[in-house]
Image (cartoon, rainbow, N blue to C red):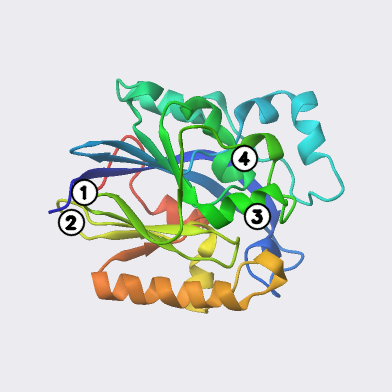
């Protein structure tokens, strides 16, 4: 029986960039606005986060962020993030604090998904072992070295895993070497698959378009992962949620509302 009671999407920042970063081989010259999301999941055995957004200090203090965002190998601009969009602020609105988070599942270690880890060093942090290897290379410029150093709280996985009943974490490599997606079976209501950056936009899913940034510049694993997610959603009768699609996000329930 599933232990998943509620799911809340958290808008942690907005990012404006060339669409070709999300859709490989198409959209160049078109700017899109993309949400940077985290997800708060309450279960009968604890609270989980899927991803933790950006490092607020790198965005709030220009000098602190300059070594990361203002470098030739990082083509993405700074996201826009307010103090109110920090995850601790969302938790406070629910009468919680960071200590109430028991575990974090990281879809991958790019700066817009793992940057906020500093607030959750007490929690178990789950990620794929291949992702840590890729971050240490680093495989691309979206890995920020100081955000990917493991601690004693890191829990590395070599394949699919389930941190609690109703939460299944599955390998979806392609965008990065150790990318993960998450199937949530809610106690009530339809299951949800959080694609992560395996699919930024509905377009990636419906038209089977690989992300613009692919590990080793190879789109084939990413395309296999998109097909895997579509099959997983079909088999589970689940909604399949892209990760950076603003129009899709605006149609969903808004914090503090939750699913179900």
Element at label 4:
loop
**Which label's residue is closer to the chain start, 4 or 2?**
4
In-image side of 144 versus 119 (left or right): right
Marks 4 and 2 sit apart, C-alpha to C-alpha, by: 35 Å
In-image side of 257 versus 117 (left or right): left
| Residue with the mark numbered 2 | 189
- Residue at position x 58%, y 47% in the image: 109
For marks 4 and 2, give the one nearer the viewer.
Answer: 4
Given residues 181 and 125, the one toward you in this image is: 125
Which label is found at residue 260? Answer: 1
Q: Do the residues labelled 2 and 1 touch (CB within 8 Å)?
A: yes
Which label is found at residue 134? Answer: 3
Marks 3 and 4 sit apart, C-alpha to C-alpha, by: 10 Å
**Which label's residue is closer to the chain start, 4 or 1?**
4
Q: In this view, does 15 lie above or below 228?
A: above
Marks 4 and 1 sit apart, C-alpha to C-alpha, by: 33 Å
For marks 1 and 3, give the one nearer the viewer.
Answer: 3
Using a 10 Å C-alpha cutoff, classify the residue at mark 4 as few (fewer than 14 neighbours), some (14 to 19) or many (20 or more).
many
Using a 10 Å C-alpha cutoff, classify the residue at mark 3 as few (fewer than 14 neighbours), some (14 to 19) or many (20 or more).
some
Given residues 12 and 129, the one toward you in this image is: 129
């Amino acid at each position: 029986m599933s232990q998943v009671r509620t799911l809340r999407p958290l808008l942690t920042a907005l990012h404006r960039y060339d669409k070709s970063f999300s859709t490989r081989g198409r959209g160049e010259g078109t700017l899109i606005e993309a949400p940077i999301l985290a997800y708060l999941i309450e279960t009968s055995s604890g609270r989980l986060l899927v991803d933790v957004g950006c490092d607020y200090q790198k965005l709030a203090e220009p000098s602190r962020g300059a070594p990361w965002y203002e470098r030739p190998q990082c083509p993405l601009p700074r996201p826009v993030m307010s103090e109110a969009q920090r995850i601790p602020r969302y938790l406070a609105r629910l009468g919680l604090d960071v200590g109430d988070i028991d575990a974090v599942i990281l879809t991958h270690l790019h700066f817009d998904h793992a940057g906020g880890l500093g607030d959750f060093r007490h929690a178990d942090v789950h990620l794929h072992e291949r992702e840590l290897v890729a971050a240490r290379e680093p495989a691309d410029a979206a890995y920020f070295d100081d955000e990917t150093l493991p601690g004693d709280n890191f829990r590395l996985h070599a394949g699919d895993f389930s941190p609690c009943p109703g939460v299944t974490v599955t390998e979806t490599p392609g965008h990065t070497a150790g990318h993960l997606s998450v199937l949530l079976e809610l106690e009530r209501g339809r299951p949800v698959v959080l694609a992560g950056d395996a699919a930024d936009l509905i377009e990636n899913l419906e038209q089977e378009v690989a992300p613009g940034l692919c590990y080793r510049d190879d789109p084939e694993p990413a395309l296999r992962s998109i097909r895997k997610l579509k099959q997983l959603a079909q088999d589970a009768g689940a909604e399949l949620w892209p990760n950076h699609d603003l129009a899709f996000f605006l149609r969903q329930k808004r914090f503090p509302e939750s699913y179900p």
